[in-house]
Structures are given as C-alpha cells and as structure tokens.
Amino acid sequence: SSDLTQDPAVSVALGQTVRITCQGDSLRSYYASWYQQKPGQAPVLVIYGENNRPSGIADRFSGSSSGNTASLTITGAQAEDEADYYCHSRDSSGNLVFGGGTKLTVL
Amino acid sequence: QVQLQEPGPGLVKPSETLSLTCTVSAGSISSSYWSWIRQRPGKGLEWIGYINYSGTTKYNSSLQSRVTMSVDTSKNQFSLRVTSVTAADTAVYYCARGYYDNSGEKTLDAYDIWGQGTMVTVSS
C-alpha cells in the first residue's frame, strides 16, 4: 500500500480534458511531482512543484493542489498521452514514496 | 545533458547479493541527490532510497535492513547493494537524479533524470 492514493485507471476521449488525482495527508506539507511512463520505458518527469513543467514537456500538462489532493490535468489529451502516471512525494514521516499509479486510456 | 547508466547483472541467485552501479555522465555527482527506484513486473514504482555526494543516505524502511548505498565521487558513480535477495526482488531497477527544494511554501522532491533501467531476475 502507499501513503499516496491514485485511481487505478482513468479514460478520456481524444482531445478532451482529464484530471488524474493523488491523495495523501502529507500533500498538505509536500508538493507532488508527476511522472509519465510508457510500456518498456523509464518514467519521465512531467510536472513538479506547484505547476512546473520540465523543458520539452507539452503545455497541455498542468498541475495543481488543494488540501490533501494533488492533480495532474491534461488539456486536450492526445493519443501519445496514453500511459501510466505516477505521483511522488513524501509520506507523513518524510520518506519518499510513489502513488500506486493511474493507467490513462485515450479513447 | 546529464545521463545515467545502470548496467546490471541480469540474474542473481536467491540469498545472494544484488549489486548495481549507476554512472553519471555529462554532469557532477557532487550536486543534487541520487536515488534507486525499482518496479516489479506489472507493478508500480517503489522508492528504494537515496544518497548524496557526501554519503548521507536514507532508505525505504521496508528494505532498510538489506540495502546499502554508496557513492564514489572520483568515478561519478553511486551504487546499490541488496543482500539476501528473493524472487520478490525481481524488478527493473532505475537510478535517478533527485531535485530537492524546501525554499517555498511546501517542500519539493522530484526526479528529473532517470537511467534506462536494468532488469534483475532473482532465480536459481
């Protein structure tokens, strides 16, 4: 089990907006970072901090947080966004932890 | 652009020790912190621990008794050892560069650069 809870699977129609959430009490004190992982590939950082995108990440990816929930939003989802998404932060003891992951399907 | 490479042994026998080394190229290991993360087949990401250039470490409590990390700044490398491995240690092992910032409203950790991963199978 993880101190960060994600929905196992989410789907979105091509071109529509989808929000992937990550819940945990520690998120009141720690920012989440978000990773995209495609089959057979290493994870890629897509959002970190309040709402920061690394160089090369499409601007349709954005992040937000409220209370104990961090969110990754994809505005205008593309076929290539189909992947697993993981949130990452610290738990209540300050240990680093990943959420269980959300499988995004683009219909 | 900093790159990480973590070639692995491929196969390790049960009860033996798994050893991996990650080489940092086009950058200095004397900045940021450096982590190992693994992913069992079909499962999610599991944080193993981190080390910084001075050798300060922090490990996942569930693995702490079997895990040791070390750093060699002269070679720009950091390493992972997991003792007494079992089939449950079969996974893709990734090394990653950690970014830490506690200057804002909240503390931030992120892994901005990852190695390609190496599959380690524990089997006799």
Image: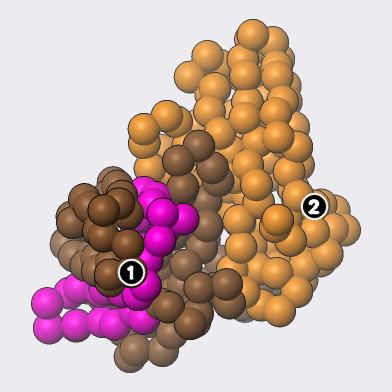
Chain colours: A orange, B brown
Amino acid on which the number 1 mark rests in the picture: Ser
- Secondary structure at badge 1 equals loop
Horizontal and vertical percent position of residue A26: 77, 67
Q: Chain of mark 2?
A: A
Question: Of all residues shown, which one is farthest toward the left?
Answer: B75
- The region drawn magenta spans B68-96
Q: Residue at x 75, y 37 (%)?
A: A7
Nearer to me, B9 or A54: B9
Horizontal and vertical percent position of residue B100: 52, 72
Q: Is residue A101 left or right of residue B114?
A: right
Q: Which mark is residue A51?
A: none
Q: Is residue A102 visible?
A: yes
Label 2 sits on residue: A23
Label 1 sits on residue: B15
Horizontal and vertical percent position of residue A4: 73, 56
- For disc 1, the neighbor class at 10 Å (few under 14, some 14 to 19, many from 20) is some
Q: Chain of mark 1?
A: B
Q: Residue at x 70, y 19 (%)?
A: A11
Which corner quadrant of the image does residue B87 belong to? bottom left
Nearer to me, B2 or B8: B8
> In the figure, A95 relative to A73: above or below?
below
